[in-house]
Amino acid sequence: MDRTIAAISTNNIGVGAINIIRISGEEAIEIVSKIFTNKKFPKAPSHTIHYGFIKDNEKILDEVLVMLMRAPKTYTKEDVVEINCHGGSMTANKIVELLYKNGAVPAEPGEFTKRAFLNGRINLLEAESIEDLLEAKNENARKMALNGVSGKTTKLIESLREKMVSLLANIEVNIDYPEYTDELQITKENITPVLTEIKEELNKIVEESQNGKIIKNGINIAIIGRPNVGKSSLLNALLEEDKAIVTDISGTTRDIVEGSIIYQGISFNFIDTAGIRETEDIVEKIGVEKSKRVQATSDLTILVLNNNEKLTKEDEELLKTIINQKAIIFINKTDLEKKLPELSIEKPIIYGSTKERKGIEELKEEIIQIFSLEDVSHKNLACLFNTRQIALAKLALQSINHVIKENKKDIPVDMLAIDIKEAWENLGKIIGEAYEEELVDNIFKRFCLGK
C-alpha cells in the first residue's frame, strides 16, 4: 500500500480514440509532475483537468489531458491521477514505461479496486460486483451487478446482521445484567418470531441467489444423442447461424462445439457434443468421453431422438442417463414418417424439425419454464451472485435453522447465541467485515489490469 502504482485502465488491444492511464498512491502527483509540461498541475485543486504534453526529457511523447483527484475523494481513497492520451498501444505503453522510470511500479491485476476495499471505500461484495459489471453478458446481469455496486444488495445483508446483533445484545444483557428488569427478558417464546423472520429472509436471499447465478453465468445446456440424429442442426437452428458442420455422415462431430444466445434476458450456452455410441475409432472415442463429461456437468440436457427411426440400443441407454437430470427430449425430423414409439418417461418432450425450423421457440420456452425464469426482468435482482457468497449465506441459514430446532428443546437461551453469532459472522464474510488475506488476494487477481 506504500507503493505508487500505475497501469493502463482502458482496453489496450487495437486502436481506439483514447487510452486512460491510472496512477494511485502518495507519490502519484509528484511522479506525473516530472513528465507533464503543465506547471500549474501539482498545486491545482482536486477534480480538475489539465492540458499539456508528456515529455521524456526533451522528447514529446504525446499531447494529453490529465485529471487530478486528491485523497480521500477518489476511487482508491489515495491521490489518483489519470492521463488521457491518444489511443493505440504504442503511445500508452511508452507513457507507462516513463512513469515506471520515475518511481511508479506496475499495478497488479485488480490492485486499484483492492486498495478501494482495504481503504474502506467499498466492501467485498461491492468489489466483486464491480468485476461482474465489467463482465456482464446481458442486461439482467448488468442490473444485478449494479445493485451490488450501488450497495442495494449490501443493505439486505446488513439488515439481517442488525437483527441478529440486536438479538445477541439482548441475550447478553439478560445474562450479564439480570438486575436490569426494564430490559426485554429474552425467552424461548419471544425469540421464536425473530428467528422465524430471519430464516424467511435468508431463505428468500438464497433462493433468489440461485437465479442470480443463472442470470450472471447463463444456463449451460448439453445437446446429446447418438450420431446423425440432428444435434448439430439443432445447435445451428438455436443459434440461427451455421456454427457446426452438418453432413449425412455419422460421427461428423468429433469434439464439442459451443455457442450462446440471449433469450428473455438469460444467456443460453449450448454445447453440441459428439454422437454417443460404442466405437473403436480412437479420436471418436475421446469425443464420446468428453460428451459424457459435458452432460454430467451441464445445468440441462437436451436429448435428440429421430422421429423417423425406431429406438436403438444407444437411444435407450441415453434415456436412462437423463432420468435424474434436468432434461428435455427433442424429437427431430417430424417432417418425415413417424416410426418412433411413444415414450414412457416423465420429461418434457418437444416435437420439431431442424430442417423446417419447427419446435425451436417451444424448446427455448420450455428451458425458461424449467428454471422458473418466466419474467426474470421483474424479479428482485438485488441478490448474491457467486459461489462464495451463496455458500456463506447457506451456512448462515444452516445456523439459524439449527437455533430454531434447538430452541424447541430444553436448552438455555444463552447457548443459542453461539449459532446466532456464527450466522452473523458468515453474513459478515460476504461483505468483507471479516476476511482472510489469501481469499482477498485470490478475488482481486481475477480482475483486469488497471482495475
Image (cartoon, helix red, strand yellow):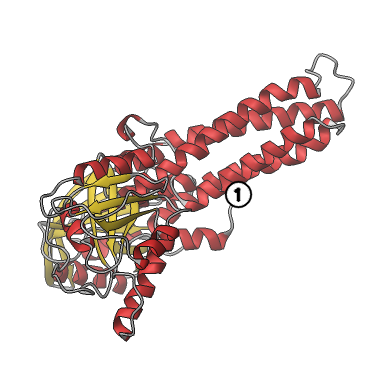
| Depth order, front residue of 214/94 | 214
320 over 376 or under it: above or below: below
- Count of numbered circles in the view: 1
- Quadrant of the image containing the C terminus: bottom left
Asked where in the image residue 422 lies, by quadrant, the reply is top right
Residue 232 placement: quadrant: bottom left
Give the labeled residue for mark 1.
434
Instruction: Note whether 68 is above or below 95 in the view shown.
Output: above
Percent of width and height locating residue 90: 15, 71
Task: Give the residue drawn at x 10%, y 56%.
Answer: 17
Q: Residue at x 36, y 43 (%)?
A: 145
Q: Is residue 322 something that shows in the picture?
A: yes
Q: Residues within 10 Å of mark 1 (few under 14, many from 20)?
A: few
Q: Left of 398 or right of it: where is 251?
A: left
The x and y percentages for residue 129 are 39, 46
Camera-side residue: 206 or 277?
Answer: 277
Question: Which residue occupies the foreground of this view, 451 or 37?
Answer: 451
| Left or right of residue 223: residue 408 | right
- The spot of residue 218 in percent (x, y) is 33, 50
Residue 152 occupies which quadrant of the picture?
top left
Kindly tell me whether residue 428 is visible in this rendering.
no
| Apparent side of residue 115 relative to residue 158 in the rendered image (left or right) | left
- Between residues 106 and 232, which one lies in front from this camera angle? 232
**Residue in the picture at 37% in, 67% down:** 313
Q: Residue furthest right?
A: 179
Left or right, residue 331 beside residue 434: left
What residue is drawn where x is 16% and y is 51%? 353
- SS at mark 1? loop
Task: Specify the farthest residue to the top.
Answer: 182
Q: Three-letter amino acid code at disc 1?
A: Ala
Residue 56, given in percent of the width and then of the height, sits at 18, 72
